[in-house]
Amino acid sequence: MPVLWRIAFRNIWEHKAKSFIIGTLVVLGVVVIVLGNAMIDSSKEGIRKTFIESFTGDVMIHGPSESAVSVFGVESMDGEMEIPTIPDYEKVLAEVKADPAVEKATSMALAYGSLALDADEVPQDEDDEAQRGPQAGFALVNGVDPATYFDMFPSILLDEGRYLKPGDKGIMVNREQLEALGKRYGKTLKVGDKILVNGFGTAGFKIREVEVVGLYKRKSEGTEGAPTVYVDVDTARVLGGLTLGADEAASLAPEQTALLSSDDLDSLFGEDLVEEAAPVKKVDLSNTAGILGDTAKREALNQADTGAWHFILVRLKNSAAAPAFMAGITGRLKAADIDARATNWQGAAGSFGKFADIIRVVFVIAILIIAVVAVIIMMNTLVVSVIERTGEIGTMRALGAQRGYVRKMFLAETLALTLFFGLVGSALALGLVAVLNAIGIEAGSDLVRLLFGGKVLHLVPRVGSFVSTILMVFAVGYLAHIYPVSVALKIEPVRAMQND
């Protein structure tokens, strides 16, 4: 075997030009594939880390729904906006916390709304989008449990003021939202000021005035999936229609429904209904209690349903255990006849996670196309190189070399070229990674920030990527030389020597 390797290295040295061309292609292929894999891995990890640490946790528990549900709302194409609440919430939460795989858990209720100031104040210029600011409009209103939520998502940093506390009636916004709202109304807003949150959805429009208790920012800038504010959960429940009256069945007396079952519908529109109009009485508006009557039941039904939560978000001790945890919790809830569902962070991220995944897939395809082109060029070069050595092969055969020996010789040459230039390419790829990380390429848009997992690109190549790349290049080289070597070996040694 050592003799075979000496011959292989001698042949590589004797054909320096061809060896250099093949080696250069190997180096380029390794660099492209290693850098591509590093970018793909960094992107995947960045997206996963962003959502798990900022929005979703490892697993999300939610109520039954025919549509896909995410922490950003219902992913529905038919305009359905109602988010299901978790049935038997206390039992579900107890099951989650009892699981030894769980590190932390928190709960959240979601509403859709917009930010405004006093209803009597008019924006400076409603038609001027630049004046109004896009962040001053729509917002996802996250009603959270302050005792657990901000501890579970430490990437939500305090910029000014304080975090929400248990028992608070307040709101946390980011600085851009508050400045845009102030610009819209020509005011300078600060922590401690009160703003209006207009909630809308299937339960109609609700308005709540809340105090700005703090400004937040995210650890990874530019990873805001959607304009988000954090409020006490009761405020979110009222804005989202999660009141006690939402589940109250309307009860009508028989005489109140008699007209609905009337056989003679024409009688409903007869002249008798307007023949004797009752005189209009003047109402004393100062006596509102007398006008409204007993409002205790109405006020009770408008109170927030304190048992209503949309999501339980779970952080596991080991994120890789998410599939096993989901299977276990789903089985236990089903056994308890509780119709609650579990999904991983990608499902909880909804369309944001899917869109980022699509962009990443496109990026993978682009890298593969470049790699395939490099591989094809390398294969063609190897084929030409072997065919040009037909005379050499004939001479070796004439001197008594067996076919198997010739094949082993070319295999040794291919392996030597692959290992040497593969290591050169790996070293060059590591150098380029270090340079790119030192330069700190900044993302130019929110989508790119999401793909980068932060404001700056940070590549972390894996050892497995280097090994798999060199093995792949060697396999390509091996497959590339099989056909031309087989063709050359079929030629009679005398003819092969004549063609030299």
Image: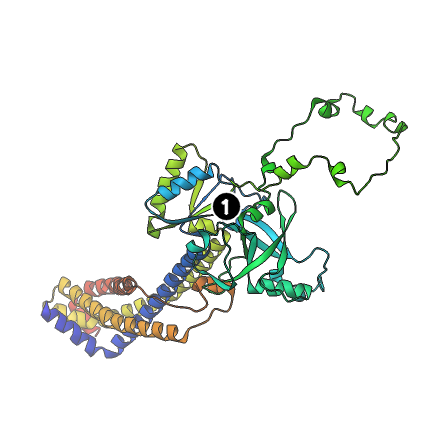
Q: Is residue 265 above or below residue 500?
A: above
Question: In this figure, what is the number of numbered marks?
Answer: 1
Quarter location, residue 374 = bottom left
Task: Name the image quarter holding the C terminus.
Answer: bottom left
Measured as percent of width and height from the top left, residue 108 is found at 49, 48
Residue occupying image coordinates x 22% and y 69%: 419
Image coloring type? rainbow
Measured as percent of width and height from the top left, residue 40 is found at 39, 62
Secondary element at image label 1: strand
Task: Name the image quarter holding the N terminus.
Answer: bottom left
Measured as percent of width and height from the top left, residue 357 is found at 45, 56
Q: Nearer the viewer, residue 474 or 409?
A: 474
Q: Nearer the viewer, residue 204 or 158?
A: 158
Q: Nearer the viewer, residue 432 or 62?
A: 62
> In this orientation, does residue 396 appear?
yes
* Label 1: how many Cα within 10 Å (few below 14, some 14–19, many 20+): many
Name the residue type under label 1.
Val
Residue occupying image coordinates x 18% and y 75%: 11
Measured as percent of width and height from the top left, residue 418 is found at 24, 69
Q: Is residue 303 left or right of residue 357?
A: right
Q: Which of 108 and 9 is in front in this view?
A: 108
Residue occupying image coordinates x 50% and y 44%: 310
> Which residue is identified by label 1?
69
Q: In this view, does 419 lie to the left or right of 108?
A: left
> In this orientation, does residue 79 appear?
no
Residue at the extreme right = 275
